Image (cartoon, helix red, strand yellow):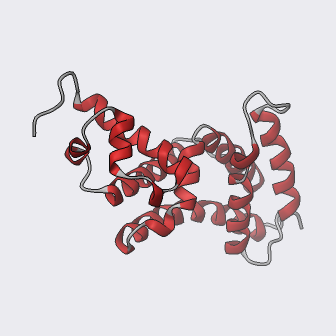
Amino acid sequence: MARTTGSHSDITGPRIREVAMRLFAQHGYAAVSMRQIASGVGVQAGALYNYTPDKQGLLFGLMREHMEELLAARAARDVPDDPLAQLEDFTRFHIAFHMERADAVFVSYMELRNLDAGNFATIESLRSRYEDELEAILQRGVAVGLFSVPDSKIATLALIAMLTGVNTWYRTGGRLSVQQVETIYWDMVRKAVAP
């Protein structure tokens, strides 16, 4: 298929992902058509299929990319040895990383139900790797008497939900900086797991 004059694959591919992410976050995956995505990019609808097999593949790619970026950023950090310091680091990291990716966070959490079984399993596996890191921190803290949680898995999911919820209300330019929000949330997390 001929490429539109002036289009470049190194620009068009990322632009498709950017527009799809924005539209999925604004309207929901089910309400967005490939034609709308193409219009937002400025290409013919058929041109999208040079970059993705279908809308499901596009959604899966966006979610996988988000999770892989999250895991890579987390792996690149120097993590302290102490479980309390590890929990603070995780809390601050989670808020700062996700604050810059509000659309990706929304799509990753709200559109899981729209993935087919195979794609869902892949994303769930990536999410589990991230959740497992927090759960391991909690378990280490419990083992040395720093934390008290009745069930480490439930505590993990509850803390991640609380931290991710920042994206629903935080607005740049509001009365609190990201660092102030991190500090407030760290205080709440610390108290939530205190013995």
Identity of the residue drawn at 79% across and 78% down? 150
Which picture quadrant has residue 10? top left
Q: How many marks?
A: 0
Q: Is residue 100 left or right of residue 30?
A: right
Percent across and percent down for residue 24 are 49, 50
The outermost residue toward the bottom is 150
Which picture quadrant has residue 55? bottom left
Identity of the residue drawn at 38% across and 52% down? 33
Q: Is residue 81 left or right of residue 131?
A: right
Identity of the residue drawn at 79% across and 31% down? 177
Q: Is residue 173 left or right of residue 192?
A: left
Between 44 and 173, the one nearer to me in the picture: 44
The outermost residue toward the top is 6
Q: Is residue 43 left or right of residue 97?
A: left
Between 154 and 25, the one nearer to me in the picture: 25
Percent across and percent down for residue 64 are 41, 54
Which picture quadrant has residue 134? bottom right
Percent across and percent down for residue 114 are 45, 66
Between 67 and 15, the one nearer to me in the picture: 15
In the image, residue 125 above or below residue 45: below
Identity of the residue drawn at 81% across and 31% down? 174
Percent across and percent down for residue 164 are 68, 53
| Quarter placement of the C terminus | bottom right
Residue 140 appears anywhere in the view: yes
Residue 74 appears anywhere in the view: no
The outermost residue toward the left is 1
| Quarter placement of the N terminus | top left
